[in-house]
Image: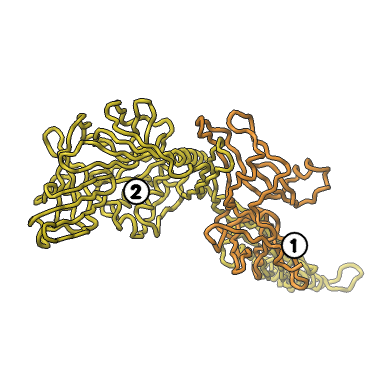
Amino acid sequence: MPVLTDLAAAEVKRGVKTLYGKVLTRPALLVSDGINLVYACDVDIGATDPTGRIDQYKDDLTGLPGQDDWTLQDTLTVNTILHNVTIARNNADLIYADVGAPVTLSRSMSGQWEITGFSMEQPGTYTLVPVNLGDMTIGTVIDLSIDGRLLTLGELGTMAPFGTLPFGASGIFIGGILRQIV
Amino acid sequence: MDYRWEPVPLDSFRSVKVLLHKTASIGEVRRGEAVDPVDLSPMMSQGKQSCFDVNITLNWNYELFGAENQPAPNHVLEIQLMQAGLFVTLWIGIVESVSSFTISRGERSMQLTAKSRDSLDIFRTAKRVTALFPQLTDMAYIAGKIAKSAGLDDDEIVLPISGMTTSHTNTQLADMSAWDMLTNLFLPLSWTPFMDGQGRLKAASRDVQGAIADVVLEPERVVKVVAQRQRPPATRLKVKWLDPTLKKSLQQGRKLADQTMTTGWFLPFLKKTIYFSDDKTQRAVNTYMVTKQSANALFVPVCLERYEQLEQNKGKITLINLAWGPAIITLLVQWQAAHSTPDGVSGPNTVPVGRKLEGYAQLAFMLIMMSIGTGIYEIWGTPYEWVHARNTTEAFDSSAPRWVDNPVEVETDFIINEQHAQAVAVRELIYQAKSANKWAVSLVDDPRIEFGDILEFPDESKMYVEDVSRSIMRGDPAVMEIKGFLI
């Protein structure tokens, strides 16, 4: 499969050429052109979806004012993550970017993004405050922050029979709740 | 509220002066120090004043003939209203344009437009850069600096106490107009900057939830109410803010540096500082030394190999020699002493005692001389950086159906923490959602009312004032038009 076909080409507001992101999966040889090897990883670029992240959760959230809590369905996917973003050549350090590392993404003329360096800025927390403008009540704050990190030894043992998950496995957390193991 | 004024009595008529100041500054006009004003009101055939501008039409005979007499851009225009038998300054602005200048048989007319000082290019267009403000600088202090750079005097900056300071180590605003700077600066305070009628910088609160009315209107003062909805209300408000707290970002553990070192009997210690990157800036934790080739690889133990991390960006390799110079001197003395030992034979062997002693001393000496080794070491560890997170806090209308979704996004770097961001997001959502519900009302004139005031109507509904306008023609009914939104 050609390298570029699997790359995300996100439509992002204002035609920006540079984004700051947060690595969510450890860079790996995910794609290959047959001769040269290309490292790639998934990157959280923050909530730039013009429709807003709340849209994808809205039907699946309970806990509006007057209710008890918010729950997320297990089947939800996160669509503000760029998948299999390639890492620019001659960036040995970038190959060692671990889960959670802040990176700079540049967009090529053809619209694909690639990781070109580390950055001093990254997407941070994402919280939602429900406000009922009808009766002016404020509901429970919802945390939809995306985090990627290595799973701890305790987590490796409790999520599955110990030894099933490899040491070094990482997870994507939404609001502190594990959503995906990568 | 402009507390210099009293509400105009019912059924009053306008008594007004429109004064043109050709040389005085806004400050001089406000302080009453201006001389030689020209009263334009006798020549006015139309005139209207709002918070932001004044438009008048002048019809004249000979008074405004000649370049010296005519109004021109940058002259100061002052509107005065009668109160208790005295004319009091209501509004001060700057002439922006003179248009429709017509001279024909029986007609000499011109139109004049004046703007409040915040409408001028020095506030709205000219890009500027502020000084660098350290952490904990008061926001109102920064606003004052910006206002002064745009030409305001100390007594023209009338801001409330902000109670909020900058949270980042360094703050500098750049490549923005002064008004944009003030707007950005005031957003986390939930303020809107505005110029009052006297050309002074003030701030109006944007916190409309549960706001207390500044003016409670009696039924007879309300002349007319017109309501409209110009645009769909905001249903979501995102605040994107730069987290002042740096976040530690770890990378994968890897080799950070390598070093080849040679030591021997000639050195008691060999110390080498190792930085974790060539540019000496890479920081790392959990660093340790991997010995690829030990200096003790030969049979003779040469040294102890030690590593310790000194600081976040460097460590130190220390090789401690086991046998060094002073020991050699001691051995040389022993060797010399062995030379002085008389030969003799002990026991059945025929080896002289002195030669044995010499041999021992020589062996020890040679062993020390062999104490030379080269080690190859690598420093491994987990690099990390401190980075800023750009957080997003969103307040959304949970009662709005999905199909009316109307998101608004604001960015600010003056948010202190998550709680502050949530408070700003909620306040701003309420303000923006409410502001879609426009109202226009006609009231019996009350010059106290200015931008940002809250009016309460007899039915207890409240209105946020966004603009005030009135006719400034002599003899017109003293009525004012107010635009704003219902809260």
Q: CA distance from mark 1 to mark 2?
A: 52 Å
Please determine whether, in this image, residue B331 is positioned above or below residue A100. below
Residue on which the image places disc 1: A30
- Image location (x, y in percent) of residue A158: 78, 40
- Image location (x, y in percent) of residue B122: 30, 57
Chain coloured orange in the rendered structure: A
Determine which of the numbered discs, if any, sits on residue B143 in the image: 2
Q: Which residue is drawn at the image coordinates 18% and 47% (left, top)?
A: B78
| Quadrant location, the N terminus of chain B | top left
Secondary structure beneath dot 2 equals helix
Secondary structure beneath dot 1 equals strand
Is B78 left, or right, of B213 in this rendering?
A: left
Neighbourhood count class around disc 2 (C-alpha, 10 Å): few under 14, some 14–19, many 20 upward: many
- Residue type highlighted by circle 2: Ala
Q: Chain of mark 2?
A: B
Q: Chain of mark 1?
A: A
Query: Could one spot residue B181 in this view of the protein?
Result: yes
| Quadrant location, the C terminus of chain B | top left
Residue B452: quarter of image: top left
Q: Which residue is drawn at the image coordinates 39% and 45% (left, top)?
A: B186
* Residue contact between numbered discs 1 and 2, judged by CB atoms under 8 Å: no
Determine which of the numbered discs, if any, sits on residue B288 in the image: none
- Residue type highlighted by circle 1: Leu
Query: Could one spot residue B310 in this view of the protein?
Result: no
- Image location (x, y in percent) of residue B407: 52, 46
Residue furthest out toward the front = B105
Is B118 left, or right, of B287 in this rendering?
A: left
Please determine whether, in this image, residue B228 is positioned above or below residue B366. above
Residue furthest out toward the right = B348
Q: Answer yes or no: are tags 1 and 2 on the same subunit.
A: no
Using the image as rendered, state which of residue B47 and residue A26 is in the foreground.
Answer: B47
